[in-house]
Structures are given as structure tokens and as C-alpha cells.
Amino acid sequence: MGFGIPLTGVDILKLLEGMAAGTRLSHTKLDDILTGDHHARTTIADLSPIALANLVAAVCSKTEADGKITTHAGIADAHHAKPTFTELAGGEGYHASASTTWEDWDLSAIIPAGAVTALISMQQENTSIYDVGARRNGTALDRKMAAKAYVTQNWLTEVDANRVIEIYAEYCNNTKFNVLGYWS
């Protein structure tokens, strides 16, 4: 570890580990560094912007970049279309089969292949307050919250490739689920 030889991360770590707590690193702690080896201190204020014309083209020239952008613009598959929302009537009135557990709800008869997100309506049909929830199939995320009596909550939930989501009803007989729409 001497002057003129680039230090590796291991060298720097060894140097720092050898310092006592509260000490500062100075040139006297470095091998082969003399008092005449000092350099001028540079601050952010000392730096000036570098003109674009002075930069070396590391990847390609402006002409080449413009050509690549034009080529990319002509490739239909290279662009992501804005998702399209399709509204549904939401008359399923689906009830979970068991209380206090997450269960799969297969939406493939309701929304088509290619759907990525569903708008799920959950309605509490009782005078009590119960937890309800909807989430992406297979996740451990506990996406549920208390639903007040006779209040409807609308949730966005990612659907898997088979159009399955998971739903939760603290009291399954009093919570109705509907699909109000989907994005594809």
C-alpha cells in the first residue's frame, strides 16, 4: 500500500480498521506520503459545468443516437399502451365460502384474458363492522380493513394470468363482492 499504487477496497478497509476511535486520517498515517505531496482542495463551488460539445461520445454520436431513437419509434412492440378500463355491471353478489380466511376467487368467467387489474366492490350487509379485503393471488400482503355497516368499498387488485384474486371476509355471510370493471 504505497504512493502511486491505487488502493483497493481491502486496503482502505485495513487502513480504517487500524485507526483508533475518534482519530482522523492524515497523511502521516499513509505510507510513502510526504508533506510535499499535498493537493489543492476542490469544492463543488470550484467545479464548472462541462459543455456537451467537450464530452467524449462514450456510446455513440448524436447522429447514431438520433437514428436509434427513430428506429425505436417505428417498433410497435417497443411501446406500452395506456391500459384500457372496461366497466362492468357488477351484479355477481359473490360471498366468500368461509369467514376469517383468505380464499381464491376465480374471475375468468367475468373478465377476459389479458386483464391486469380488477375494480372490486365489497359491501358489508350487516349492522356490525367486519374486516374485508382483496389482494393479488399468492401474496402475503394483508390488504384488509374494517367495513362499516352497509358501506361499500371499492378496491383495485392485480389479477394473475388466470384472472384469480384473493378475497377476505371476516363474516362471509354478510359481505358481498362484485367486479365493477377491469384494466387490460
Image (cartoon, rainbow, N blue to C red):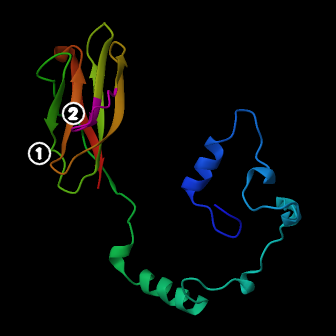
Q: 52 and 126: which one is in front?
A: 52
Q: 85 and 132: which one is in front?
A: 132
Dot 1 amino acid type: Ala
- Whole-Å distance between the Cαs marked 2 and 1? 16 Å
Horizontally, is 83 left or right of 160 in the view?
right
Q: Quadrant of the C terminus?
A: bottom left
Is residue 37 part of the magenta span, yes or no? no
Percent across and percent down for residue 179 are 24, 38
Question: In the picture shown, does residue 107 fall above or below 4?
Answer: above
Residue 157 found in image quarter: top left
Percent across and percent down for residue 10 are 54, 54
Magenta span covers which residues?
134-143
Q: Residues within 10 Å of mark 1 (few under 14, many from 20)?
A: few
Q: Nearer the viewer, mark 2 or mark 1?
A: 2
Q: Earlier in the sequence, mark 2 or mark 1?
A: 1
Residue found at x 22% / y 39%: 137
Q: Secondary structure at mark 2?
A: strand
Q: Quadrant of the N terminus?
A: bottom right
Determine which residue is flagged by label 1: 109
Percent across and percent down for residue 101 are 19, 20
Determine which residue is flagged by label 2: 166
Residue found at x 21% / y 13%: 171
Q: Residues within 10 Å of mark 2 (few under 14, many from 20)?
A: many
Q: Secondary structure at mark 1?
A: loop
Q: Residue furthest bottom?
A: 63
